């Protein structure tokens, strides 16, 4: 399974919108540098390193004429521009942010949504340490949601099917569930097996069982599992995928599930 950290690109006509700047953004940047488009938007779920570490290697940032609007949730301690600039400090990297010749603009997400061409991007809080959000992308009646880091049913080790819909543990996710209603394709993590999750509660990631519980509640057509555990081998992931399919079947859920990987292309 690919070794890059998180980056998603949504393309609709001439509109290019990137989500997260993990190391995967390096390949995306190479393709964008060679393409005709010069206006880019980059939405950040949160500024943990695996979601921003690719930005210093993002070719369009160095090319005059590119305009890159970077949107991120408000961080109380430090603004996003200084967080991005911090990883371009001389101690870590040979070139600095002032060497980037694209026009970069940084803005905190407000409480609304953004319209970019025909695409609407909206956001909701994610259950993850620090200021973190997840996104929904809507275009032409299709809805794609991107939840790379989200601890659904935090701390719950039982079978999510045993929880009543009004159970407090589900109720805390009401905002997310409303946000996800009618989603066609959901990109959501399921980082830990149920056994591993018992030792990782509060780390900000879901167990396979709890993520399957979310899928049952919203019933997307497709689920792409992302944010694989760095300790999982290819065969661990294969095993985890079989387990996920087994749980979904047991729940009577018809959602098609697959694992995300480097270079995966999906058409909506
Ligand atoms: Zn994180
Ligand atoms: Zn992460």
Image: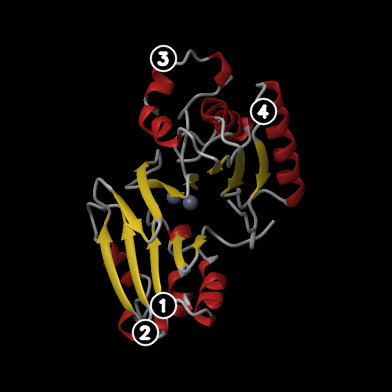
Label 4 – label 1 distance at C-alpha: 42 Å
**SS for tag 1?**
loop
Mark 1 touching mark 2, by CB under 8 A?
Answer: yes
Vertical comparison of 256 with 24: above or below: above
Disc 2 target residue: 65
Mark 4 or mark 3, which has the lower sequence index?
A: 3
Q: Nearer the viewer, mark 2 or mark 4?
A: 2
Mark 3 or mark 2, which has the lower sequence index?
A: 2
Mark 4 touching mark 3, by CB under 8 A?
Answer: no
Mark 1 or mark 2, which has the lower sequence index?
A: 1
State the residue at coordinates (50%, 40%).
Answer: 205
Q: Is residue 158 visible?
A: no
**SS for tag 2?**
loop
Mark 4 or mark 1, which has the lower sequence index?
A: 1
- Find residue 38 and name its label: 1
Label 4 – label 3 distance at C-alpha: 21 Å
Disc 4 target residue: 248
Mark 2 touching mark 4, by CB under 8 A?
Answer: no
Vertical comparison of 87 with 45: above or below: below
Vertical comparison of 189 with 164: above or below: below
User: Dot 2: few (<14), some (14–19), or many (≥20) neighbours within 10 Å?
Assistant: some
Query: Across the whole image, how many numbered discs are drawn on residues?
Result: 4
- Furthest residue to the front? 140
Label 3 – label 2 distance at C-alpha: 52 Å
Q: Position of residue 30 (x, y in %)?
A: 54, 77
Q: Position of residue 20 (x, y in %)?
A: 45, 59
> The N terminus appears in which quarter of the rendering?
bottom right
Disc 3 target residue: 166
């Amino acid at each position: 399974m690919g070794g890059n950290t998180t980056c998603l690109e949504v393309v609709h006509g001439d509109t290019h919108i990137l989500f997260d700047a993990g190391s995967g953004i390096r390949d995306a940047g190479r393709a964008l540098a060679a393409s005709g488009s010069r206006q880019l938007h980059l939405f950040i779920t949160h500024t943990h390193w695996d979601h921003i570490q690719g930005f210093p290697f993002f070719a369009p940032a160095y090319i005059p004429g590119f305009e890159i609007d970077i949107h991120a949730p408000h961080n109380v301690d430090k603004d996003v521009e200084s967080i991005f600039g911090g990883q371009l400090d001389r101690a870590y990297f040979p070139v600095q942010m002032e060497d980037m010749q694209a026009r970069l603009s940084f803005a905190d997400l407000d409480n609304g949504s953004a319209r970019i061409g025909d695409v609407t991007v909206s956001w909701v809080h994610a259950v993850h340490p620090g200021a973190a959000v997840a996104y929904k992308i809507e275009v032409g009646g299709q809805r794609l949601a991107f939840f790379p880091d989200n601890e659904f049913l935090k701390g719950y080790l039982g079978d999510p099917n045993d929880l009543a819909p009004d159970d407090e543990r589900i109720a805390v996710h009401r905002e997310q569930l409303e946000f996800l209603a009618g989603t066609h394709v959901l990109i959501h993590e399921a980082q830990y097996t149920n056994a591993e999750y018992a030792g990782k509660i509060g780390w900000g990631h879901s167990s396979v069982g709890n993520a399957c519980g979310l899928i049952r509640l919203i019933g997307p057509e497709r689920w792409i599992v992302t944010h694989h555990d760095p300790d999982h081998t290819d065969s661990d992931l294969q095993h985890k995928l079989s387990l996920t399919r087994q749980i979904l079947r047991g729940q009577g859920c018809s959602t098609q599930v697959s694992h995300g990987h480097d270079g995966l292309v999906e058409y909506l």
